[in-house]
Image (cartoon, rainbow, N blue to C red):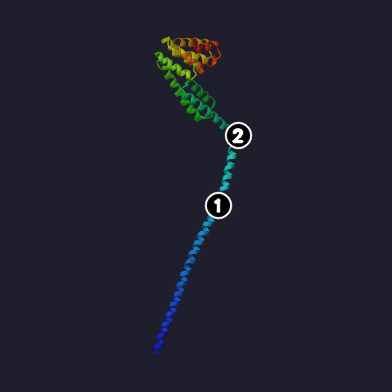
Amino acid sequence: MATKAKVKPKASKKASSRSSARAKSIVLKAKPAKASARNGSRNTSKAAAKTSARGSSKPVSRMESRRTQAVNASPLDRTRSRHFANAVQAYEAAIKLMHSEQFEKAIRCFEDLIAEHTDEPEIQERAKVLLHACEKKLHEKDRTVLRSADDHYNVGIAELNRRELDSAIQHLEHALKLTPKGDHVLYALATANALKGSRDQAIHHLKQAIHYRAENRFLAARDSDFESLQDDPEFRQLVTPAEK
């Protein structure tokens, strides 16, 4: 009898332990279910946010921007854009003249730009600044003292290269007064007059240039500045070497 009483408590302990183990296993299994439920709710909320974002107004905003552009692109704006393009083109042309030191022409271009494009204040302000800079450069150039024949010759050649023929001839004539036998000055005068269309003056100076230096004959024969005289009999005789 005593032994039987001892066995019963052991069975009850095992049963209780088994029940507690089952309870623990149930609790352990229940935890992942809760976590998955939470993850599911988070995923569904993220998916809903993504779908709402995808279904948001990206295409609508593009269409709205196109509509606003179509509304804003009025005929007046198109006219202004054409005027602006013309103003920019005139501005760039004036700057090119300024960089090539053709200050008088650049000044005229800037003045025309300021007068014609009053509806472009920014371009006008820049043009006015560069206009004053050209005027300053022109005054500095006028104040430069040219004393020697080389001074006048160098300025004359620079003007000749810019095709400022009247100014080039004026400086070259000053140089010739200081060096009457300067064949390089005479040759430059011949080319300037040929480009200007003054045939007699060109032939006259070329004769003298060849007289003081025979090599000028060969230079003139290949010089494109004398293109206007290529068919002239007197010019052809000058540049053709004499037969021995």
Q: Quadrant of the N terminus?
A: bottom left
Q: Position of residue 19 (x, y in %)?
A: 45, 77
Left or right: where does residue 43 sit relative to residue 140? right
1 and 2 marks in contact (CB < 8 Å): no
Between 229 and 33, which is closer to the camera in this rendering? 229
Q: Residue furthest front?
A: 244
Which residue: 42% across, 84% down?
8
Q: Which label belongs to residue 244?
A: none
Does the rendering let one see residue 198? no
Does the rendering let one see residue 34? yes
Q: Is mark 1 on a helix, strand or loop?
A: helix
Residue carrying label 1: 54
Identified by mark 1, the residue type is: Arg
Q: Which label belongs to residue 75?
A: 2
Between 173 and 51, which is closer to the camera in this rendering? 173
Crowd tier of the residue under label 2, counting other residues whose Cα lies within 10 Å: few below 14, some 14–19, many 20 or above: few
Q: Position of residue 107 (x, y in %)?
A: 49, 22
Of labels 1 and 2, the one closer to you: 1
Q: Is mark 2 on a helix, strand or loop?
A: helix
Number of marks: 2
| Distance from the alpha carbon under mark 1 to that under mark 2 | 37 Å
Q: Where is residue 5 in the image (x, y as percent from the top left)?
A: 41, 87
Which residue: 41% across, 82% down?
10
Q: In this view, does 57 lie above or below 108?
A: below
Left or right: where does residue 79 sit relative to residue 97? right
